[in-house]
Image (cartoon, helix red, strand yellow):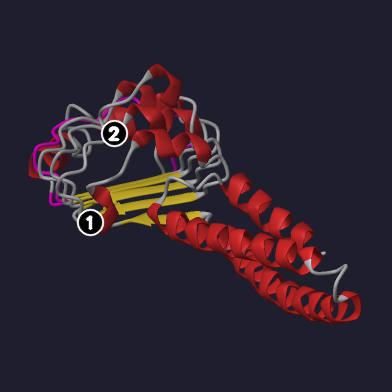
Amino acid sequence: MAESFVNNVFDKLSSFALEEVYLAWHVRNELQKLSETSTSIEEFLWSNADQQQQQAKSRQDEWHEKMEDIFYDADDVLDEFQVHAKTVYNHKKIGEHFKLKMLRYLTSLEKLVISNCEKLDLMIADEGEMDVLRSLQFFAIEQVPKLVALPLWLQGASETLNHIVIEDCLNFTTLPEWMKNLILLQKLEVSGCQRLTSLPEFTFSLREIRISQCPELIRECQRETGKDWQKITCVPDIYLDNIKI
């Protein structure tokens, strides 16, 4: 009975595909130790069954009952973990160890927030990492000095991504032309990116754009006079430095 719970728990860990994310490392290591211990105990109990059959059976039943409780708890924890795994907050602690190959496993991820990662470089990617994050709906990134453009792998969410936030990325210079392929993008917020000076063409799905603390870009987005005005003229709600125009 306990063996089935062990298998169920490890199946869930595999389905999460978060084995390479630091949180799941610790969960998996502890459960692996628990599984090995449970196997050793069961082997010991069965080896003594011939000599002390009644005593061994009683002890085995008691052990099974306890192990069921343990793995029920582990199963419940992982159920909850699976729900919350739809949001990943990638802060400074893991930013230094972040690997793009992790993303290919996060096919159910709906919300990704990356914050305060001084050493994180998101611009390095292989062709095999383009088709990732296929369920992503919200992407926010802030205080990542090495970011100069939106990462290419966001194109994997071209049919789901609807909200992008970029804040205080001091070296950010480029909103790429492929953003017009984000067919469900409805809201774009850019703040504190002073090196960003122009906009790409957007999909007609865009409903709101907010730009603040980006003086050059704001100048180019002014109604009628800015060179980028024609690129956003069809957007219903436009805010420049928190003022609707």
Graded by Cα atoms within 10 Å as few (under 14), some (14 to 19) or many (20 or more), the crowding at tag 2 reads many
- Of residue 11 and residue 116, the one placed in the foreground of this image is 11
Quarter containing the N terminus: bottom right
Whether residue 208 appears in this view of the structure is no
- Of residue 231 and residue 140, the one placed in the foreground of this image is 140
- Of residue 128 and residue 162, the one placed in the foreground of this image is 128
| 128 on left or right of 210 | right
Q: Which residues are magenta?
A: 192-213
| 162 shown above or below 128 | below
Q: Secondary structure at mark 1?
A: helix
Residue ID for mark 1: 92
Could you say which quadrant of the image residue 149 lies in?
Answer: top left
| 171 on left or right of 101 | left
Please provide percent x and percent y for residue 198: 18, 30
Residue ID for mark 2: 150
Q: Nearer the viewer, mark 2 or mark 1?
A: 1
Q: Per the image, is 223 magenta?
A: no
Q: Residue at x 49, y 26 (%)?
A: 131
Q: Seen from this angle, which residue lies furthest front? A: 51
Q: Seen from this angle, which residue lies furthest top? A: 127
| 22 on left or right of 118 | right
Q: Residue at x 75, y 76 (%)?
A: 63
Please provide percent x and percent y for residue 70: 67, 74
